[in-house]
Image: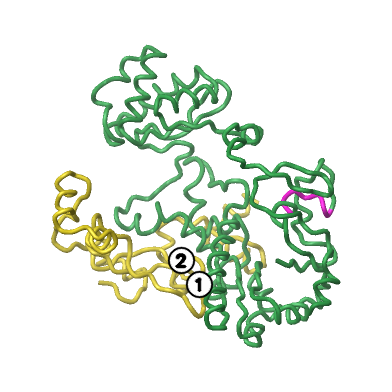
Chain colours: A green, B yellow
């Protein structure tokens, strides 16, 4: 995979955090992780379309992301016309068609326009969007799967095509569980519920002595196990009441009592204590981990989740799945352009 | 910012900002997705065959391929809809073996019921334009 970069470098190179907290074009951890194994070719803005023309002759796939007007300015539609087998994959805020084609967007706009933001956060506050560019990553995954299908078709019959991905649609697709068809069926507006679902599970975040744990007691056996635990440790015999047993609906109207009883237990222990004992008892419980806790997780360590990534000559720990390191700015310009 | 945005509806804010080249969107609620002109123009919501409802509504796939778009053969399956195909054709179980599994509570048959319709089919077509509403 070849990245065409302007002389100042791709904007992702300037995105913190940086290795050692020090800014540098080769020190952005975002850049280093997401571009490991790629090549970098330096191209002046006015020469970008010509570079694409030169590369299209040997490329099977061109990946574009950005506003639709930039897709047009690069001449990607006509590029496909001149290179029959070429697949062009595009991720734009609203897709390459429709009345909002020219609208500007990004992560927050994608969440908002896709109906996902309205569902996240507390009911009495504005919607929130989780950290981490999850929407853009999801759109990228859809572009990947579409591109693989298009490349397979091109291998079969020599004809390329456009893979058009809208960030708005990617987010609307991901919320399908609570999405439009579900809403139309029961006309119950799904609202923001904070860190709890009012389902009587209990289902949501509960305070521990050092943070929070998440409990999702969706099955009767989960509640039975949790109720026994609550009763043993807190002395709250009401947790064992027969009227609370069964699936979620059994505890729906008493969810405030259930949440109260659960929190009485969880406040007594640390996240890790609750996790180990909860899992031992068959309760669906997990710690709400911060980044240091994820880094120290013995399960991830045992599963070989981590690998060493080279960032500006230093090796750092990163989730596995990459090959090699990210390219230095313009590192492969001569090599790649000589071949065109 | 809040003092300015509070003067307008979310849609007005988004249109004003987008006209000035600023990324913006209302935080759409579910009902608003049904009447989104952008999602409608791109055919995001679709109808597919359903064993119970005849046709059912579902969200399309976010990657649109221009030449080989693929097709969705059906909406989500009904409970037990493909027993014959999986147990019979794929696994090659004969009638007697399938009856035995049914009686043992290992597999379940799709309950028979008169054809149903989603409660919203009669009116949603006036808001969400699609070909083939039943």
Instruction: Please give the name of the residue rendered at 15% of the width and 58% of the height, measured from the top-left corner.
Output: B95
Circles 1 and 2: CB atoms closer than 8 Å:
yes
In space, the residues marked 1 and 2 are separated at their CA atoms by 7 Å
In the image, is residue A199 part of the stretch drawn in magenta?
no
| In the foreground, A334 or A95 | A334
- Horizontal and vertical percent for residue A127? 53, 47
Stretch of the chain drawn in magenta: A25-31
Q: Is residue A75 above or below residue A297?
A: below
- Horizontal and vertical percent for residue A19? 80, 44
In the image, is residue A30 part of the stretch drawn in magenta?
yes
Q: Is residue A110 left or right of residue B49?
A: right
User: Which residue bears the numbered disc 2?
Assistant: B61
Q: Is residue B6 left or right of residue B45?
A: right
Q: Quadrant of the C terminus of chain B?
A: bottom left
Instruction: Please give the name of the residue rendered at 39% of the width and 19% of the height, measured from the top-left corner.
Output: A229
Callout 2 crowding tier (Cα within 10 Å): few <14, some 14–19, many ≥20: many
- Horizontal and vertical percent for residue A208? 52, 23
Looking at the rendering, which quadrant does residue A160 occupy?
Answer: bottom right
Instruction: Please give the name of the residue rendered at 54% of the width and 25% of the height, measured from the top-left corner.
Output: A271
Instruction: Please give the name of the residue rendered at 82% of the width and 67% of the height, measured from the top-left corner.
Output: A332
Specify the subunit that label 2 lies on. Answer: B
Specify the subunit that label 1 lies on. Answer: B
User: Which residue bears the numbered disc 1?
Assistant: B64
Residue A146 appears in the rendering: yes
Residue A10 is tagged as none
Residue B81 appears in the rendering: no
Q: Are marks 1 and 2 on the same chain?
A: yes
Q: Is residue A28 above or below residue A47?
A: above
Q: Secondary structure at mark 1?
A: strand
């Amino acid at each position: 995979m070849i990245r065409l970069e302007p002389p100042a470098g791709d904007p992702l190179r300037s995105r913190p955090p940086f290795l050692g907290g020090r800014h540098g074009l080769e020190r952005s951890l975002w850049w280093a992780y997401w571009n490991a194994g790629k090549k970098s070719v330096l191209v002046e803005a006015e020469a970008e379309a010509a570079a694409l023309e030169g590369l299209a002759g040997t490329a099977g796939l061109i990946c574009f992301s950005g506003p639709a007007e930039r897709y047009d300015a690069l001449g990607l539609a006509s590029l496909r016309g001149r290179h029959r087998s070429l697949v062009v994959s595009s991720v734009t805020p609203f897709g390459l068609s429709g009345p909002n084609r020219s609208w500007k967007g990004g992560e927050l706009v994608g969440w908002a326009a896709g109906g996902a933001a309205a569902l996240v956060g507390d009911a009495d506050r504005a919607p929130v969007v989780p950290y981490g560019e999850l929407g853009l990553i999801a759109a990228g995954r859809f572009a990947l799967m579409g591109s693989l299908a298009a490349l397979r078709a091109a291998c079969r019959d020599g004809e390329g095509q456009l893979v058009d991905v809208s960030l708005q649609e990617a987010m609307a697709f991901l919320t399908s569980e609570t999405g439009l068809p579900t809403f139309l069926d029961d006309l119950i507006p799904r609202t923001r519920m904070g860190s709890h679902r009012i389902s009587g599970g209990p289902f949501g975040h509960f305070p521990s002595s050092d943070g929070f744990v998440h409990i999702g007691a969706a099955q009767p056996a989960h509640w039975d196990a949790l109720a026994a635990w609550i009763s043993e440790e807190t002395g709250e015999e009401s947790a064992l009441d027969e009227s609370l047993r069964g699936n979620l609906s059994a505890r729906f109207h008493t969810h405030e009592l259930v949440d109260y009883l659960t929190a009485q237990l969880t406040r007594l222990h640390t996240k890790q204590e609750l996790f180990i004992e909860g899992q031992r008892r068959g309760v669906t419980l997990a710690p709400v981990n911060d980044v240091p806790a994820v880094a120290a997780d013995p399960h991830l360590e045992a599963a070989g989740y981590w690998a060493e990534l080279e960032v500006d000559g230093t090796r750092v720990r990163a989730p596995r799945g990459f090959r090699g390191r990210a390219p230095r700015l313009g590192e492969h310009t001569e090599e790649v352009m000589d071949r065109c | 910012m809040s003092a300015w945005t509070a003067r307008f509806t979310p849609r007005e804010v988004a249109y004003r900002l987008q006209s000035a080249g600023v990324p913006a969107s209302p935080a759409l609620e579910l009902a608003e997705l049904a009447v989104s002109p952008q999602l409608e123009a791109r055919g995001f919501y679709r109808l597919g065959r359903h064993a119970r409802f005849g046709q059912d509504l579902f969200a399309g796939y976010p990657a649109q391929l221009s030449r080989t778009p693929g097709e969705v053969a059906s909406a989500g399956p009904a409970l037990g809809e493909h027993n014959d195909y999986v147990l019979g054709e794929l696994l090659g179980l004969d009638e007697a073996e399938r009856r035995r599994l049914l009686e043992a509570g290992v597999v379940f048959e799709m309950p028979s019921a008169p054809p149903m319709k989603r409660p919203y089919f009669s009116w949603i077509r006036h808001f969400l334009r699609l070909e083939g509403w039943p």
